[in-house]
Every structure is written in C-alpha cells, then in structure tokens.
Amino acid sequence: MTALDQIDLQLLRLLRKDASVGHGQLAAELYLSPRTVRSRIQRLREAGVIRFTVCINREKAGFPAAADVVAQVEGNRVARIAEQIAQFPEVGYVAITTGSHDISIQVYGQSTDEIHRFVVEKLALVPGVIRTNTFVLFKIIEECSWAPPLLAEGGEKRKRGRRPSPSPPTPLPLPILGEGEGRSWGE
C-alpha cells in the first residue's frame, strides 16, 4: 500500500474533478512546480493508486436506466461467478459482499425493460446463480466522484467526533451554489 500525504490527497481530488487539466494548472492550484506534479502523478500511476479512464454520462449516452442487483450464488463458486458476471456489457460494477447475498451488481440499460431482460435472460442463466433481487435506481445522485479524505493537521486522518484545529484555507476550489441550488432537510 502506498502512503499518501496531504499533497497527494489534494492532487487526487483535483484529478477526480477533471483529469484532463494540465500539469501547469494543477501546479498553480497546489502551489507546486509542474515537474513536481508530473512526478507525483507518475508515482501514483506506477503504484497503481490511479489510472486514467473516462466517466461516461450514462443518461446523455442513452442509458438512463440503472439498477442494483444482488445475487445469491453457490458458495464455492462466488469469485468465479462474480468474474463471469463482470464480463457482461450491461454491468457497471460487481462486488463480492457479506450478508444474505453474495454478489452486488450495478446494471445499466436504455430502459427498465432492458434491465429486466438482462436479469431474466442473462444473469439468471449463469450457472451457480441461485436467486437475484433487483432494485431499480430512480436517480443516482453522485457517480464517479469518490476521492480519499484529506488528512488533518499533523498528517493523520481526522478521528470521528473530534473537531480539527484551525488551519489556513486549502488551495482547493469550493463549489459555489447559485440561486435555487442546494436543498434543506425539510424539502
């Protein structure tokens, strides 16, 4: 496992927001030289911490329907079945889980009918799948945006329930909500 420092974490957050931004702009936002940014990115890539890929806007690409499917499978074949399911083009992710189900799957399609066909005509026919349960997702609020939390002062992750000591503002840009954006809990 690669140890990430505060600069790495800030760099990851900026790249997560827009990986196409140039080293010069990243360097300016992090108060580093472009060469330092380039070498940090290269180190993170070589360590397998990051890889560059594209996050597709499913709705604009014509695949607005999404569902989480959990599957119960034969216990001695969980990993093999999960790997087989991951090969279907409708599948966005596959995870081996704990609890009453063995595998969690996120599926995308042009319609819920298409997702239904996938579950009934493909997934249910995979040898070793015993039972599935499908949850249609009305709206995915956040997708393709996770980044590790920033470190508290002193280089340690902030402990839950403890207020951090005051620190100077970070060079990371904060989102600005326009009129009518944001929600209150009462809505």
Image (cartoon, helix red, strand yellow):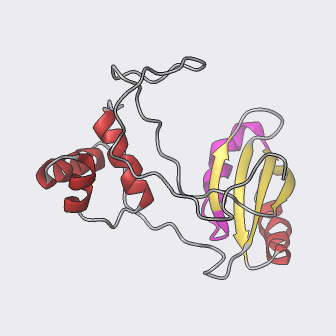
Total numbered labels: 0
In the rendered structure, the answer to whether residue 53 lies left or right of residue 100 reads: left
Q: Residue furthest front?
A: 179
Please give the name of the residue rendered at 52% of the width and 48% of the height, measured from the top-left corner: 146
Which residue occupies the foreground of this view, 74 or 107? 107
Q: Quadrant of the N terminus?
A: top left
Q: Position of residue 142 (x, y in %)?
A: 63, 56
Instruction: Say whether residue 48 is visible.
Output: no
Locate residue 161: give its quadrant.
top right
Instruction: Say whether residue 100 is visible.
Output: yes
User: In the figure, 10 relative to 87: above or below?
Assistant: above
Q: Position of residue 20 (x, y in %)?
A: 33, 67
Which residue occupies the foreground of this view, 173 or 4? 173
Which residue occupies the foreground of this view, 112 or 90? 112
User: In the figure, 79 relative to 29: above or below?
Assistant: above
User: In the figure, 31 relative to 2: above or below?
Assistant: below
Q: Position of residue 106 (x, y in %)?
A: 70, 58
Please give the name of the residue rendered at 31% of the width and 40% of the height, measured from the top-left corner: 8
Segment tinted magenta in the rendering: 73-91
In the rendered structure, the answer to whether residue 44 lies left or right of residue 107 reads: left
User: In the figure, 8 relative to 136: above or below?
Assistant: above
Is residue 86 inside the magenta stretch?
A: yes
Please give the name of the residue rendered at 58% of the width and 59% of the height, measured from the top-left corner: 177
Q: Position of residue 42 (x, y in %)?
A: 22, 51
In the rendered structure, the answer to whether residue 67 lies left or right of residue 159 reads: right
